[in-house]
Amino acid sequence: MTDQDLYGESSEVTWPMGETTMYGTLVKPSGLGPFPAVVMVAGSGPTDRDWNSPLLPGTNGSARLLAEALARAGIASLRYDKRASGPHARENVPLLIGKLSMQSHVDELAGAVHVMAGQAYVRHDRIFALANSEGTLHALNYQLHNPETPFAGLVLTGPPGQPVGTVGRSQLAAQAARVPNGDALLALYDAAIARFLAGEPIVPDPALPEGVQMLLKSLETPANLPFARELWTADAAPLLRQVNVPVLVIIGKKDLQIDWQADGEKLEQAAAGREEVTFLFPENANHVLKQELRPRSELVPAEITESYNGPDTRLDPQTLASIQEWLTAHA
């Protein structure tokens, strides 16, 4: 068996977008095709095409592992760097100040789909989204904006079933519950967020932990606006209700960022009566679809995120098999 059989044939691709250039990686399975394909949409922050982040150690990103596994299953893929992520982020960010928005992320995705649809070995009527976390919102918005090439289906992993700000606050509340003055700190956080949503300066209280102050300040940096305010109220549930193609929703039971019960229930309610929407809650998958065998009660959020892309991490087998099976069934 050759390396191409194991990992597919990778090639770099670029396309212009405004004053900037988009960068991505195509993976072609072994054989002539035409193949079904996925466009991968990364999660929040400076997460790159491989789903690595400079904020976290390790380079064993889930998107690269997924692309290689899907190639072995006869499915092509394209993964791309958002313009504010990856090796060209530093040169792009000054050009993007005031221009990053929910719509700009949809535009980035539209460019990626256009490139994928232009590959001779790809079935342009069988291109799917495979999105993670924040990326699920962009995939849903793309599908609902009457795109030139609509997705044949969506694989949404770790989608927020509540407004993003609500999800973020629940994570912070869980941490605040473990410190003596947690309620008071949470009240200071809520006050700062209220100012942010009202368009006023956040001015974080010095009593807040440094990490929380940094998070709050990052929301109002010019490079993150207007996107940060739009994202804070974004919610996948009402978007899911409007989509009319097959959807696979995956939230791992070891996901500490999106709760498989709280968020999963909201999404299931939104999809009630929709036979083409399938839900999967893998026992041992974390937020980035890696296998986590420790009991959930023993998991500490900071430690888990630190290990997302460690060299010894691997995709959760149940999750990977389910994605492959679902895509093959709908190809």
Image (tube, helix red, strand yellow):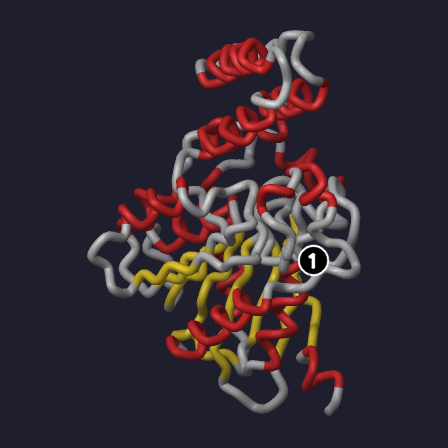
Q: Residue at x 78, y 52 (%)?
A: 58
In the figure, is residue 314 to the left or right of 191? right
Number of numbered discs: 1
Q: Which residue is mark 1?
A: 61
Indicate the quadrant where residue 316 lies: bottom right
Q: What's the residue type where badge 1 is placed?
A: Gly
Q: Decide: few, some or many residues near mark 1? Use Cα within 10 Å; few <14, some 14-19, many ≥20.
A: many
Please determine whether, in this image, residue 271 is positioned above or below residue 204. below
Q: Residue at x 50, y 15 (%)?
A: 190
In the figure, is residue 106 to the left or right of 14? left
Please determine whether, in this image, residue 322 is positioned above or below residue 282. below
Residue 263 spot, x, y in % from top left: 41, 42
In this rendered view, identify the residue nearer to me: 237 or 106: 237
Residue 251 spot, x, y in % from top left: 47, 53
In this rendered view, identify the residue nearer to me: 168 or 87: 168
Please determine whether, in this image, residue 3 is positioned above or below residue 26. below
Q: Report if residue 207 is visible in the image.
A: yes
Q: Residue at x 41, y 44 (%)?
A: 261
Residue 138 spot, x, y in % from top left: 46, 48
Which quarter of the figure is the C terminus placed in? bottom left
Which quarter of the figure is the N terminus placed in? bottom right
Q: Report if residue 201 is visible in the image.
A: no
Q: Residue at x 59, y 25 (%)?
A: 219
Residue 267 spot, x, y in % from top left: 34, 47
Indicate the quadrant where residue 201 lies: top right
